[in-house]
Image (spheres, rainbow, N blue to C red):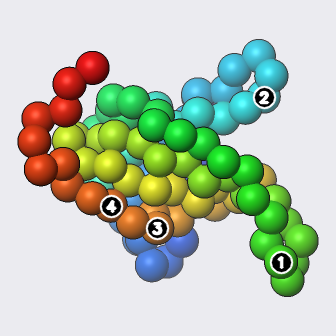
Amino acid sequence: MKVGDMSDQNAGIKIIFYSGYKGEETPRAIVVAGREYPVEKVIWRKRGQDKDARESYDLVRCRVAGQELTLKISPSGECRLLGRRRSPFPLQE
């Protein structure tokens, strides 16, 4: 497992990753103020590239504690929380 740091804008938030056999990193938990919240489900994942710096990144939409979060993860492990949406109803699998 690996821990990624969030940028200054998201100070105090860390993401715990699981690395699979292909080296793909999947977020498994988010730590806020010392409390760990497991990622319930990865909803989608997309790869993008910064137009100016030409650096690739992953966008990951996941469900954590009943909320949907979008994370931007750079190859260096830096993470940013881009947005969140509270589910208006209990989510069912």
Mark 3 or mark 2, earlier in chain = 2
Q: Is residue 73 above or below residue 49?
A: above
User: What residue would you read off at disc 1?
Assistant: 51
Q: Can I make out residue 83 in this image?
A: yes
Residue 4's x, y, as percent? 57, 50
Q: Secondary structure at mark 2?
A: loop
Which label sits in the foreground, 4 or 2? 4
**Which image quarter: residue 37?**
top left
- What's the distance in space between the residues labelled 3 and 4, CA to CA? 7 Å
User: What residue would you read off at disc 2?
Assistant: 23
**Residue type marked 1:** Lys
- Neighbours of disc 3 within 10 Å: few (<14), some (14-19), many (20+): few
Q: Secondary structure at mark 3?
A: strand
Q: Residue at x 58, y 28 (%)?
A: 18
- What's the distance in space between the residues labelled 3 and 2, CA to CA? 24 Å
User: What residue would you read off at disc 4?
Assistant: 84
Q: Is residue 35 above or below residue 14?
A: above
- What's the distance in space between the residues labelled 1 and 3, CA to CA? 18 Å
